[in-house]
Image (tube, rainbow, N blue to C red):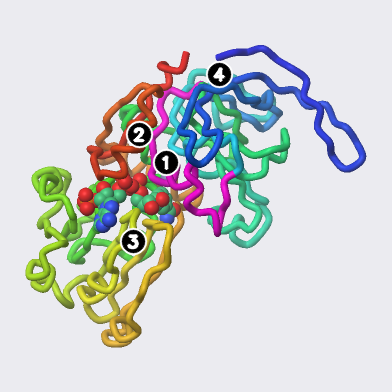
Amino acid sequence: MNEATQKVALEEGSHTQEKRAYVARAYAAAGPTSGLAAATIRRREPGPEDVQIEILYCGVCHSDLHQVRNEWSGVMPTVYPCVPGHEIVGRVTKVGSAVSKFKLGDLAAVGCMVDSDRVCPECQAGLEQFCANMTLTYNSPDKHLGGVTYGGYSDSIVVDQRFVLRVPANLNPAGAAPLLCAGITTYSPMRHWGVTKGKKVGVVGLGGLGHMGVKFAHALGAHVVVFSTSPNKKEDALRLGADEVVISRNADEMQKHAGSFDFILDTVSANHDIGAYINLLRRDGNITLVGAPEKPFAVSAFGLIMGRRSLSGSPIGGIPETQEMLDFCGQHNFTADVEVIPIQKVNEAYERLLKSDVKYRFSIDMASLK
Ligand code: NAP
Ligand code: ZN
């Protein structure tokens, strides 16, 4: 980590305020088609409530790819340079004077959020992901240094202790990193929709999110069916905890499950026919979208009306539930299945994500950035 400290002048209204910052190494995209390359960024020096973390591993989420390539321009346009990464695990290297949750050397984690207003009803309920003033780990306005926040494809990060999570000691750090987004994004809707023993649960798409969805649904005791477009993932799906695997391009195989699911989690990153999955729900069944393709879906009203079925979405999870999820993984002793890569391979990893060629999450070894 480059500890060189510099003074940064910030314009705040008519006042110029001096903020202490240091230079960190990172990988950044200069534009939607540039790819990612080595860069330096500023991080704030830790304030009283802040924790500074030396990043050991950062997972590669398909959202990083959507954001870097500005595929969500209508909803959250990308500000360049963009440093993605919101599946962060590392060691605490500095703590502010008021930090009680962490000490030097602790294993700590940061997910998709680094701040929120803490006073709204959502924050009071521990559902910071719904706070109107929530700050995302990257591509959100940075209220400390100006510009936008920078994510975990970097050697260090500084985050308020309230948004820093504890990692159970028995979890492998490279595999634990993806829990911070792929983990909580699949765990939260399953808890919300009551996935338990005796429920029939579908997971659509066996990628980073999907493979965690299978692990959680299995650990929660459900009968798990994986829907995949990739026949070569069948054995892995069974090993990960699926009871059955359906190749979704096969209409006959799909039809066998018509009207039978209590809950389906759709993790697919590209446009596809969700009507085919709505038809697989039983009465009062729910399909939750966590996958966030670029373009809108077409949905038949009758598919929902008949059977009083519901279609919903779900974003990540709140901080208390994220800690609960990490502790659940600690108790059940599992993490994500990762392919560890050096940061120099990240552009290649994005190309492989687009080909559904990852088993099942890339985790960047940040030592490669030194
Ligand atoms: P990923 O690792 O690339 O996995 C996506 C999987 O979807 C692929 O492995 C593939 O599974 C399937 N798939 C891909 N293209 C398809 C197509 N054209 N038709 C049908 N299936 C296809 O991605 P990820 O990191 O898990 O993320 C998945 C999506 O969730 C992304 O859109 C991401 O932005 C979104 N996301 C949302 C949240 C949230 O808070 N809601 C959080 C994180 C990520 P098979 O090979 O098995 O078919
Ligand atoms: Zn993510």
Q: Which residue is mark 1?
A: 180
- What type is the residue that disc 2 sits on? Ala
Q: Earlier in the sequence, mark 4 or mark 3?
A: 4
State if disc 3 and disc 4 touch (CB < 8 Å): no
- What type is the residue that disc 3 sits on? Asn
Is residue 311 visible from the viewing direction of this image?
Answer: yes
Which of pointers 4 and 3 indicates the residue nearer the eye? Answer: 3
164 vs 4, left or right, is left
Q: Earlier in the sequence, mark 1 or mark 3?
A: 1
State if disc 4 and disc 1 touch (CB < 8 Å): no
Mark 3 CB within 8 Å of ligand 1: yes
202 vs 315, left or right, is left
State if disc 2 and disc 3 touch (CB < 8 Å): no
- Most extreme residue toward the front is 33
Q: Which residue is mark 4?
A: 93
Q: Position of residue 119 (x, y in %)?
A: 68, 55
State if disc 2 and disc 1 touch (CB < 8 Å): yes
Cα distance between the residues tagged 2 and 4? 19 Å
Circle 2 — which element?
helix
Circle 3 — which element?
loop
State if disc 4 and disc 2 touch (CB < 8 Å): no
**In the image, residue 237 lies in the stretch drawn in magenta:** no
347 vs 146, left or right, is left
239 vs 317, left or right, is left
Cα distance between the residues tagged 1 and 2? 8 Å
Compared to residue 235, the image places residue 130 above or below, namely below
| Residue depicted at x 29% and y 79% | 284
Q: Which residue is mark 3?
A: 271
Cα distance between the residues tagged 3 and 2? 29 Å
